[in-house]
Amino acid sequence: MSIKSLGYIGINSTDLDQWRHYGCQVLGLEDVSAARNADENHVYFKMDDHPFRIFAQKSDSDGLALCGWETNNQQGFDQALANLRNAGIDVEIADSAQTKARCVQGLARFTDPSGNHHELYWGVVSDFARLVSPVGVRKFVTGNMGMGHIVLPAVNFEATVELFRDVLGFGLSDLMNIKFTPDPNEPNKRLWFMHCNHRHHSLAFFEMPHPAGCIHVMTEVENIDEVGRGNDRRIAHGVQLSGTLGRHANDHMVSFYMKSPAGFDFEYGAEGRTVDDWSSYEVFESTVASFWGHDFSVGQTG
Ligand SMILES: [Fe+2]
């Protein structure tokens, strides 16, 4: 497959100062906007040796703007574009200014059948400067596993999963069928987790709409102590908890969930599972989200 990882995400923001604070003081990212000579309508956050992994752009609404998917060379990029076009998906090639703004050689964008916006690129431009976290986070787990994972709403579930599985080459990692109430008439909602590298999942689709255009984004830190320090910062800055500390049954991530200014959650975790050989991996259906913890009822109040 030609997509190698989740490279970056873009966020729409009505208040970029909220993001400057949350990104730096809560998530522990480095604000590199000034170093990049960004205009006042953009904030760029560095997580590793990529020029940025998260950016926020001034908008009249809050929510996810787009996901950026990394291909490993021009051939992979061209192949992904050809596959999308053969499947009848409109692909727009970005102009040189947009391509330069993303610090890549080639950039294209498309929208999936559920209305989520995506970008594809190849050839990151980097000076390989190290992360200098303002709160002392030494490292995020990224590299060839990308910046983390993202869970997107997919009201047009089958067509959206088919696009990423059959056209773009993602593999199914595991799946869930979820009800939110004891009502036997409530239909199950499908939640499918998909991989494009050794990370257990880089992408998941949830069969329901979400006003912020995203359910959550996961960033992974080095160890459980870094997760705990992240939770301390969450408390210190008054950020509401969405899900208590727990370990997921599918990707084994030990994590907590918290609100973000974008209206979707951030999962802050460590010890995520990796799979070296997907050919011998057995897909399963989980009937629980977690081995322990992850009480999401705490996010339903306030
Ligand atoms: Fe997650």
Image (spheres, grey):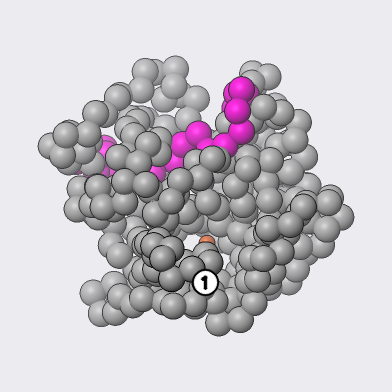
Residue 96 versus residue 252: which sits nearer the camera? 252
Farthest residue in the left direction? 86
In the image: residue 21, left or right of residue 178: right
Q: In which quarter of the image is residue 69?
A: top left
Q: Quickly name the residue at label 1.
A: 182
- What's the residue type where badge 1 is placed? Pro
In the figure, 57 relative to 238: above or below?
A: above
In the image: residue 139, left or right of residue 253: right
Q: x and y percent of residue 90 in the render?
A: 24, 28
Magenta stretch: includes residue 15: no
- Which residue corresponds to the image point at 63% horizontal and 40% vertical from the top-left? 262
- Which residue corresponds to the image point at 51% horizontal and 56% vertical from the top-left? 148
Q: x and y percent of residue 208 in the render?
A: 43, 51
Q: Tell me the crowding category of disc 1: few under 14, some 14 to 19, or many 20 or more residues within 10 angstroms, Cα based.
A: few
Q: x and y percent of residue 43 in the render?
A: 65, 30
Q: Is residue 299 visible?
A: yes
| Magenta-tinted stretch | 57-79
Element marked by disc 1: loop
Q: Can residue 256 be seen in this view?
A: no
In the figure, 61 relative to 130: above or below?
A: above
Looking at the rendered structure, the number of numbered marks drawn on it comes to: 1
- Which residue corresponds to the image point at 25% horizontal and 79% vertical from the top-left? 280
Residue 234 versus residue 302: which sits nearer the camera? 302
Q: Quadrant of residue 24?
A: top right
Farthest residue in the right direction? 236
Magenta stretch: includes residue 60: yes
In the image: residue 55, left or right of residue 124: right
In the figure, 200 relative to 260: above or below?
A: below
